[in-house]
Image (cartoon, rainbow, N blue to C red):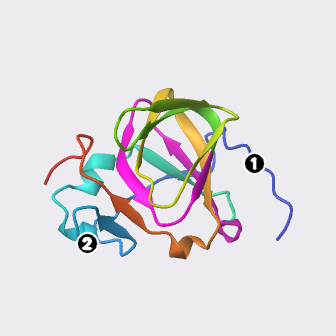
């Protein structure tokens, strides 16, 4: 792999992130597949997130960007996750809604496996990297029902 330099805060190298209701790595917390969930993932996200095309996936990292003020519905992953904010800021909410923490540029947080959380981008949006300690092909996401979903 050649040496490559990029700045994730730049606007180059981003593409709209499309979510698929039938993604086999997505599950619904009330049981069953996400495909049968009572929510519409495409309409919920509707261009609110972007994926970096400049991060080499072999390193188990992904670059993500969220539009200002957008809240990702509650979810958890089957593996521990690390998120490092590189621009803007995020508010991270706990499963029970009793605690929120603010994470600005240069900050990070970890989520243990099977720990539900909600992410909300600040007024300037948020750009971050996320990674797991296993290959991304092993990451499973279980989505929870909350008020941030567009219903079918």
- Tell whether position 63 is magenta: yes
Q: Can residue 6 be seen in this view?
A: yes
Q: Residue at label 2?
A: 33
Q: Is residue 56 left or right of residue 67?
A: right
Badge 1 marks a residue whose secondary structure is: loop
Nearest to the observer: residue 10 or residue 73: 73
Q: Nearer the viewer, mark 1 or mark 2?
A: 2
Instruction: Specify the quadrant that holds the N terminus.
Output: bottom right
What separation in Å lies between label 1 and label 2 (alpha carbons)? 37 Å
Badge 2 marks a residue whose secondary structure is: loop
Instruction: Specify the quadrant that holds the C terminus.
Output: bottom left
Residue depicted at x 75% and y 48%: 6
Q: Residue at label 1?
A: 6
Q: Which mark is residue 55?
A: none
Residue 16 picture location, percent across and down: 45, 52
Residue depicted at x 38% and y 53%: 75
Nearest to the observer: residue 58 or residue 26: 26
Residue depicted at x 81% and y 51%: 5
Residue 51 picture location, percent across and down: 53, 53
Q: Can residue 62 be seen in this view?
A: no
Of the numbered discs 1 and 2, the one sitting upstream in the chain is: 1
Q: Residues within 10 Å of mark 1 (few under 14, many from 20)?
A: few
Total label count?
2
- Work out whether 59 lies above or below 47: below
Q: What stretch is highlighted in magenta?
A: 57-83
Residue 49 picture location, percent across and down: 44, 46
- Looking at this view, name the residue that lies furthest to the right: 3
Q: Is residue 102 left or right of residue 10?
A: left
Residue 92 picture location, percent across and down: 48, 37
């Amino acid at each position: 792999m050649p040496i490559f330099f990029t700045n994730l805060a730049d606007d180059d190298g981003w593409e709209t992130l499309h979510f698929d209701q039938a993604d086999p790595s997505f599950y619904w917390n009330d049981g069953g597949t996400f495909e049968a969930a009572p929510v519409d993932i495409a309409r919920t996200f509707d261009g609110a997130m972007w994926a970096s095309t400049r991060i080499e996936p072999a390193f188990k990292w992904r670059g993500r960007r969220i539009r200002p003020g957008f809240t990702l519905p509650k979810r958890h992953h089957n593996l521990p996750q690390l998120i490092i904010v590189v621009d803007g800021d995020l508010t991270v909410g706990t499963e029970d809604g009793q605690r929120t923490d603010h994470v600005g540029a240069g900050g990070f947080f970890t989520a243990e496996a099977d720990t539900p959380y909600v992410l909300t981008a600040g007024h300037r949006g948020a750009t971050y990297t996320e990674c797991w300690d296993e290959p991304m092909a092993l990451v499973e996401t279980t989505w929870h029902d909350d008020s941030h979903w567009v219903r079918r």
